[in-house]
Structures are given as C-alpha cells and as structure tokens.
Image (cartoon, rainbow, N blue to C red):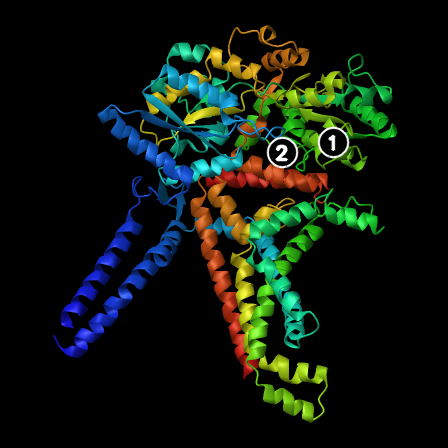
Amino acid sequence: MQSNQRKALALLLAGSLALLSACGSNDANGSNGTGSASASGGTASASSASAGASTGEKTKLVFWNTSYPTIDENDKTKKKEDFYIYKAIARYEAANPNVEIVIQDIPDGTNAMTKFQTAGIANNGPDVTNLWSGNYTMDLKSFIQPLNDYLKPSDIDAMTGWNAVTENFADKGTIYGVPDGSDGTIGILYNKKLFAAAGLDPEQNPPATYDDFVAMLQKLKDSGVTPIGSEQDGDFVYFLDYWFAQTVGTPGINDIVNGKMNFNNPKLLQVMQGYVQLYKNGFVTNDQPQTQFYNRKVALIFGGYGYLNDARAALGDDLGMMKIPDFNAEVLVKNGGIGGTGADFVVSKSSKHPEEAVKFILFLVSKEEQVARFKDGYGKLLNLKNVDPGEFTNDPYVVKQQEWAGEPSTIFWPDNIYPSELSDYISSMNELVVKQQLDVRDFLVKLDQKRDEINKQR
Amino acid sequence: MHFRTKESMTGYLSLLPAFAALAAIVFYPMVNTFFHSFTKWNGAESHWIGLRNYTFIFTNGELWTLLRNNAVFLLSIPGILLLSLVVSVLLFEEVRGWRFFRSLYYIPTILSSVVVGMLMKMMFAQSGVVNQLLHALGLTDGKTEWLTQVPTAFMVLIFCFYWQTLGQGALIFLSGLSAISHEIFESADLDGAGWWQRLFHITIPSLVPTIVYFTVTNAIYCFIGLFSLVYAVTQGGPGRETTPIDYMIYIKAFQTPDQLGYASALSIVLFAIALLASWVQIRLSNRYQD
C-alpha cells in the first residue's frame, strides 16, 4: 500500500515537473510543435537547417508569402505549380540544389505585420517575408535582420526604392529590407463609355483642379451614373493623401510627422472640406467599388498599376486612365500622384540562414524574375534601373504607369511615412468623416492629438 | 513520519499538478502582464517607465469611448435576460413545437462568434439579404449602410450577441425552472392563481439566483468576450466607435509597434473594471435575495 502511495506521489511529482518545464521553456526550440502549423514550420526549418549544415542535408528557408497570388478566384482548379511564385521557387531550387524553399501563404497588410510581430516575439519567424515598406517595416525592426552586410553595391545600384527600406528614409544607413518592385502612381481609372455618355473626354480635357473635377463629377451624376467608387475608409491612402501631400509637399509631411506642422492648418482644412463635399454632393458610393466599376455601374475608381490588369480584363478598350487633378493652383507638387515602392522583402532575426535568405530575395528581385512576374501579370511594376517595360508589354497604360512612377512628382506613400499607428488611426477616423459623423476640423484635431501622443510615447 | 503529516503531504502533492498548471497558464501571465504594464515593451525588449502607460490611458480620452462602447453592450443585458426568460418559460410550459424550438434556439450557441459575425456581416452588407428583404417589403430603399453608421453598427452587434446568447440563456433558465417544485405550482393553481400571477409571484422570484448567475456571466462577457464578434463584424468601426476595451488591447498589442506595455496596462485596467462590476452586481443581488 505504502509502496503504491510512493509510486503515485512520484508520478504526481514527475508530472508536475514535466508540466512546469514544458510551460517554462520559452526558447525557439521550446515552442516547437505548440504553435500554429506555419509557426512551427518556421522553427522546424531553422533547426533542420542548422542540422543540415553539418550533415550536408538541404538548407530549408521558410518564406511567408503575403503578396504573390497562389489562388485564382476565377479558376479554383488552377494548380499551385502553375502560379508564378511556385515556378520561380522551382527555378531557384534547381539552380541551388542544396536549398529548399518552404512557402506559406499569409494574409497581406496589417495582418501580416501582426503575425510577423508575434512570431518575432516567440523567435519563430520565417526566414523571408514581404512587408509594407517605410515605417511599417521600421516599426518592426526589432525582429528584422539589418541587411547591409549581405548586400553588394551592385545589388543596390541595380534597383530603385532603397530609401523606403533604409532607416530614416536616408540615402545611406541601416537597410532593413529589399525593395519589392514599384506600385506605379495612383491615378484615376475610368470608364470611357460612361464618360462619353456624359459628354466628357478627359483625354482631351483632363480636369486640372478641384473645381474642374467637381464639374466633371456633376456631369457624370447628371447622366445617371454614380461617379466615384471608393473603399469604406474613403480611399484616404490612394486619394486624399495625395491632396494632403501635394499641398504641403514631402518636407511638409515630414514636418507633420515630427510635430513641426499640424494637420489642423487652413490649407489642409480646405482640402478636407473639398473632399467631404464630394460625399455631400452624392458623387461617391462605398459599396463594393471595384466590382461596381468592373460591372460598369460606377464611372471611376482610384488606383494604380495594381488594379490595371483586372480593370483591363473587365472593361477592355473602354478603360481610361488619368492623373488625380491637383487640388488647386497653389499646391507645391503639381500633376503627380502617390506611389513608389510600397513593399519590401525582409529577413527575420529568427532566421538561421540570413545569407541564404538574402540570396533568395535577390533572386526574386533580379531582372529576369521581375520581368517574368511582370509578364505573368503580377501587380507590381519593375524597380530596375535602365529597363524599359515597353519591351515586355503592349498595354500603353502599363508603360504610362512605369513612366509616371519615375517622375519626380510621384510622392512616396505618405502612409508609409507616418508612424504605422497613425496611418491606421487616420484610415479608421476617415470612415467617420466620409459618413459625415465627424466634423473635418475635429478630424484634423484628432489626428494632431494622436500624432502628439505617439511622439510623446516614443 | 506521522500518519496525519503523511496524509496532508499526500493532499498537498495531489494539488500540486493543478496548482502548477494554474500557476503556469494563469498566475504567471497575470504577474507578467502586471509587471510589463509599467514598462515600454515591444516583445523583445522592455524598459521601466513607471506609471506612464496608465497616465496615457487615463488622459488621452480614448478610455472613455471604450468604456462607453462596453457600457452599450452592458445595457443590452436586460433585453437578452428578458428574452431568454420568456423563451425558457414557454419551453417549460411545453407550448406547441417546444422540442423543435428548444433545439433551434440552441444552435447559434454552438457556432463560433467568428462564424456568427461573418454571417451577420454578409447579411447586413449594403447589398446583403437584410436590405434586399426590407426593400422587397417596401420598408426602405434597400441602401441602408448598417455597419458604417454608429447606432446601426451597435444594433447589428447586439443582435449577434442576443442571437448567440439566447440558446444558452434559455437553457440556464430552463434548468432553474426545473429546480422549482411542481407542488408550489399545483397549490398556486388550486388557490386560483393565473399564468401571470404564477410568473411574477412564483417563477421569477424562484429564479433570482439563476438571473444573478446569468447577469454576472454576461456582464463579464461584455467586458472580456466581445473581441471575436467585434473583430468579425465591424473591426471596431466606423472609426473606433464600436471598439470595446478588449479589442483595443488587441490593437495596441498586436497591430501597434512597441505598445505591448500599454496593452498590458489596459488589460490591468480592464481586469479591475470587470472585477468591480462583478462585485457590485453580486452585492446588489445578495441584498435583493435577502
């Protein structure tokens, strides 16, 4: 009896100790097998890779794919191997037989950043992933490998967009990512037929200022069509941010971020009032803007190269493209738009093979691969120097997008310059503005308060 | 070793596994969160900043919007309480089709909040089935933007909350009703008490402990359990107007860089509020029961 009691006690003690040790282990290996499939995959890759190095086995690199399409909404039977990224990986693995790339699909945007951050905290991040560039990336730099030691000057010279991945947007400094293509320049995609029915020809008479724009929208409305399709957040990033940025200039955006200038100033207030008037006049619908545009129920949407292929497929020769009109004649940057390198590839600090990871990234952004994905219809333009996209496409709008992207009037995404928390806040609050549930002046005051709070916390 | 000492040792050691599990998955995270609420923490590094996180929480004005949002859900509890009570009484009285309705009301409870939320989001979209139905009935123009206006967004969220809680509430009240002696009802019948008299003088007073349990658990839910529903339906919008505190903790912890310390402080504030609300409710209900 006593012996049984002792055994039971010993078993209890052993169980307790095992439980404590299991819960107490917080290193990378300790979290193996307990996280999500992808997270554990990431750790597994790291451990197997280190083992592989000593045994001659393959080095595994985990790639969290946030941007390359791997599902075709119009053809669900399409095999994975038929998508560009799988073909590219196959090419890379064939050229590097000692490397195996494990691709895992991750949601894009802020969800990707959330996942990357939590994985970084648990030290089981991927080897390589895509993030939004600028401050979206810089805000996560605690979990990202600086890449200066792995990049050759020739790598840097071959591409544009390095400011977007360098600390403080400087020309030289710590590089945290590799710029991933270009988003082109956000303009207006419109339906030529609907415009013609309203007696408008923006190719001959493009609207130059806000007043011209409003007159044009009024004609469209009078013809019985909804003029603008816009996302729920009022397309702040694509549209309103341009009027903001062109009014104060890029240095002005930096001053706003640093608190030297306020959002709540007479010029931006005027922009906001004009912007909200578009909603008050009934020019805008926020209900499924792209679908309605492709179905010819909405006359225009704001978009860049990323929307061009789908829009062309839906509207064919009826598709038109023009720049967003300047807000007024006094703006500091004229005839431009928002755009640039909005995304980058990064190597996580959890990676045990940063050199191999950078090699894989440089393969993906090499001239051959950028051209291959461009021809495949991927939603990014080339960010290679001295390459003419006209060689690879017959679509004049694609060529025009590449030209616009290179113009000095294209302003780098302001939402990538604002602290990411502020960008998220602006988008949220702008929803209230477009629904006229928040006064425009109050909106600007709130943005200043948020900016000040963020700066204070820093 | 003395027998009693051995016996108490066995008792303590038997408790050890459960205590170790609690310590690891409850107490350690709580202490860790409390400690980090005084730091600036990005998940990798932290440094002590004293009460600064709490100062920001109480001075930036955001807390009051969050509390208001939680309060809206809190104030909706009497509605679901009443609804659950009525349904459970009808089921208890075995009205026609009660077996079918008992199952029907319980189905939403077994669905995850995210599933319920996504379903409602689709139904209440501008081109969703609700607008189509209202338009077909000639009640609206079919273009109501349910989720982008603050009052209607709350209405949809509360509808989801009710829909998901009704089955569970009816079940809780049914078990409470089953515990009431049939003899009481029979003697009330003999004394000539009508249905309403039985309801207000026998059924409801007998159900007070059940009502307290239901109210307290749902009040706690309104502070700490709304995240998945809000995330699936409105994502806290429009603006931050339907963002409850637990959703803001998520935003600060996982969608805002370097704010894990702030999120920890907000968690401590939420813990204190939920504790206080539960304590007040239990005190009030004790007084009522007495």
Q: Relative to A5, is B128 above or below?
A: above
Q: Is residue A437 left or right of residue A255?
A: right
* Whether residue A186 can be seen here: no
The residue at 39%/42% (across/down) is B43
Residue A160, percent from left and from top: 50, 14
Q: Residue furthest bottom?
A: B191
Residue where numbered disc 2 is placed:
A263
Residue B124: x and y in percent read 70, 48
Q: CA distance from mark 2 to mark 1?
A: 33 Å
Q: Residue at x 46, y 54 (%)?
A: B267
> Left or right of A222: which side holds A392?
left
Q: Is residue B200 left or right of residue A135?
A: right
Which residue type does callout 2 highlight? Phe
Horizontal side, residue B123 vs residue A378: left or right: right
Q: Secondary structure at mark 1?
A: helix
Label 1 CA crowd tier, 10 Å (few <14, some 14–19, many 20+): some
Of A128 and B115, the residue lying toward us: B115
Residue B266 appears in view: yes
**Residue B181: quadrant of the picture:** bottom right
> Compared to B259, does A42 lie above or below?
above
Circles 2, 1 touching at the beta carbon (< 8 Å): no
Residue B141 lies, with reference to residue A50, above or below; the image says below
Q: Where in the figure is residue A165, as x and y percent of width and height? A: 46, 23
Q: Which residue is mark 1?
A: A292
